[in-house]
Amino acid sequence: MKIQHWFWVLFGIAGLISVRIFEDQLFYDPFLEYFHEANKKAVFPNFNWLYLVASYLFRFMLNLVFSAIIVHFIFNNIKWTVQAMVLMVMVFALTFPIYLYCIHTKFEIGYLFSFYMRRFVIQPLILLLIIPLFYYRKSLLMRV
């Protein structure tokens, strides 16, 4: 892999890390503190639905862009980059409404379930599956 590609991969990783480090300053998320307490008895915060949904969508878009940069410069294949983005959008499209329902019911569905749904919404966990999947795919294509 070219040094320039490694630079872009590192840039994408730094971008994902920055989103996580600066989440308090960048995003409106009253549930950050709620889940940091890790206490089932924590007080459910007041929040604004519009700001909350917009903030989660903005965070997802940032994670999607940085993840796409990583995938693109690791595999140097635009089709695979688009496929990775589609997979990430699909996972978000599945988990986001579930998480919003959890919020709507004030996490009555379960604290841990809601916690993990939130993880899929705010963090690019699917990237940890896509990269090995694409490496495996690449090795299969090289054998043929």
Image (cartoon, rainbow, N blue to C red):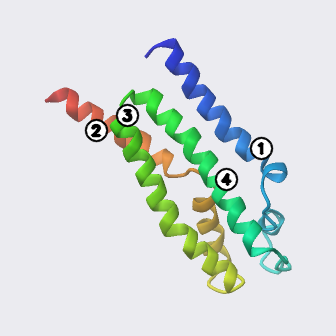
Q: Earlier in the sequence, mark 4 or mark 2?
A: 4
For label 4, count other residues whose C-alpha is less than 10 Å away and answer few (under 14), some (14-19) or many (20+): many
Can residue 10 be seen at all in this image of the molecule?
yes
- Between discs 3 and 2, the one toward the N terminus: 3
Q: Nearer the viewer, residue 78 or 67?
A: 78
Q: Would residue 5 be found to the left or right of residue 135 on screen?
A: right
> Gap between marks 3 and 2, in whole Å?
15 Å
- Can the viewer see residue 107? no
Q: Amino acid at mark 4?
A: Arg
Label 4 and label 1: CA atoms lie apart by: 12 Å
For disc 2, the marked residue is: 137
Closer to the chain start, of discs 4 and 3, is: 4
Mark 4 vs mark 1: give the one in front.
4
How many callouts does the rendering have?
4
> Which mark sits nearer the N-terminus, 3 or 1?
1
Q: Residue at x 63, y 46 (%)?
A: 62
Q: Nearer the viewer, mark 3 or mark 1?
A: 3
Quadrant of residue 58 within the rendered picture:
bottom right
Q: Are the two marked residues, 4 and 2, in contact with CB atoms closer than 8 angstroms?
A: no
Using the image, determine if residue 88 lies above or below residue 22. Answer: below
Q: Which residue is mark 4?
A: 59
What type is the residue that disc 1 sits on? Ile
Q: Position of residue 13 (x, y in %)?
A: 61, 34
Q: Amino acid at mark 2?
A: Arg
Pointer 3 with pointer 1, Cβ within 8 A: no
Label 1: which secondary element: helix
**Where is mark 3, residue-wise?**
78
Which residue appears at 67% of the width and 53% of the height?
A: 59
Labelled pair 4, 1 in contact (Cβ < 8 Å): no
- Label 1 sits on residue: 21
